[in-house]
Amino acid sequence: MNNTQIIENQRTQQETTVVRQTKRPRDYQQIGIYKDVNPLDWEDWHWQLKHRIRTKDALLQIIKLTPEEESGIDKAKGKLSMAITPYWVTLIDQEDTDCPIRRQSVPVAAEYVISPHEMTDPCAEDRDSPVAHLVHRYPDRVLLLATEHCAMYCRHCTRRRLVGDDMQEEVASALRFDAAIEYIKSNKKVRDVLISGGDPLTLEDEVLEALIQKVRAIPHVEFLRLGTRVPVTLPQRITEKLVTMLKKYSPIWMSIHFNHPKEITRRCKNACDMLTDAGIPLGSQTVLLKGINDRPYIMKKLVHELLQIRVRPYYIYQCDPVRGTQHFRTPVAVGINIMEKLRGHTSGYAIPTYVIDGPGGGGKIPVGPNYILSQAKGKYVLRNYKGKIYTYLE
Ligand SMILES: *Cc1c(COP(=O)(O)O)cnc(C)c1O
């Protein structure tokens, strides 16, 4: 072999390693504290929840922490405290402090820097809440906040005002939604109910079923969606029992929060397959995050991999101006450029809508490249994805 071939070989090997890292979490048994865990426990979602990483000492047994992380963890008490499932921890790259998995889950001191324009409730959800646990912004659909808990607390969470205080036990019953159910019953225009939170899939099957049943029993509710991140942060939660239950209440759609190709592991694919095979259409919702998915090639890889696991990219959100998230926010131009690099360059099915949730309660507003160059009396001058100009006469 000559030198060029050797270098080529090394490069191919390196690329293979990179690809493999994005596909396979570290085998959990290679991680000291998990080496004796029984595979049946590992696959048990209650075990995963119970063994979440909640303290600095626990995390230090798995990764070395930077001073910014240590101080962030010390401060993250009460709301949006740190909680990382053992499964998610296996996806963290120990060597890379910028690892996208790590940055989404490990608090940093920057979360305690509050920038101008940042708000506690940027989308004014509390103002648009007619009864407890319900946000009614659009004429025909409502958002029902079913729980304040998640499997993992994302550091960019837009509902950090509500979510993640695990000291506060919830009344584990569907009774607390009675006012919300009554409200939907008495509003005949509501045809679509989005159950989110927190993460509704952290509720026990029986509690979730009782809620879904009540919503589905309302005659004018045509369909129901679940907003969740569980297939990504706790895929063990997607059990046969759960999907059999959900299937009974078809049509149910699901929006899953995906941010980076590294999240699409075989285990996650397996969970998504179970949902899709049960007739639940899956969509993804992605938050544009600085240093995580703000490069067009990463977003393209993400949307391509999503299609391969039968998840339709639905939205890319501009990161809401919620308090303490400045370090995650990119300029809007970054998002527009990503959309420019997608449309025309790849399958239409791979292209989500980039939206800004109007601060103060405007709802989701689509933003993107402008393809209409001029518009006058029956004549549209348009450009295509290559910049070529076309005229359409009405
Ligand atoms: C996002 C959202 C919805 C659902 O919006 P779609 O564009 O239909 O997905 C409904 N209500 C509220 C308050 C929302 O924030």
Image (cartoon, rainbow, N blue to C red):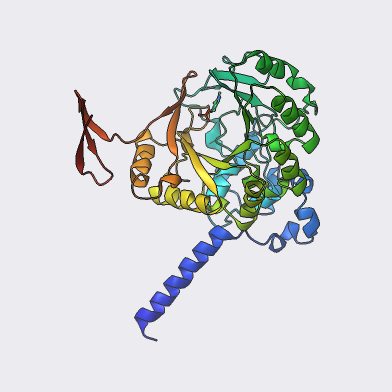
Q: Kindly indicate the quadrant of the structure image that contains residue 84.
A: top right
Depth check: 198 or 352 in front?
A: 352
Q: Is residue 37 visible?
A: no
Residue 46: where, in percent of width, then height?
78, 45
Left or right position of 358 against 204: left
Residue 190: where, in percent of width, then height?
60, 20
Q: Kindly indicate the quadrant of the structure image that contains residue 154.
A: top right
Check the image and report above or below for 228 versus 125. below
> Total label count?
0
User: In terms of image quarters, where does ligand 1 lie?
Assistant: top right
Residue 238: where, in percent of width, then height?
70, 46
Image quarter where the N terminus lies is bottom left
The residue at 80%/59% (across/down) is 38
Residue 112: where, in percent of width, then height?
55, 31
Q: Is residue 353 visible?
A: yes
Image quarter where the C terminus lies is top left
Depth check: 77 or 375 in front?
A: 375
Depth check: 199 or 80 in front?
A: 199
Left or right position of 71 against 1: right
Check the image and report above or below for 132 versus 227. above
Instruction: Determine the residue located farthest toward the front in the rendered image.
Output: 394
Depth check: 151 or 166 in front?
A: 151
The residue at 76%/54% (across/down) is 42
Instruction: Determine the residue located farthest toward the bottom in the rendered image.
Output: 1
Left or right position of 206 against 252: right
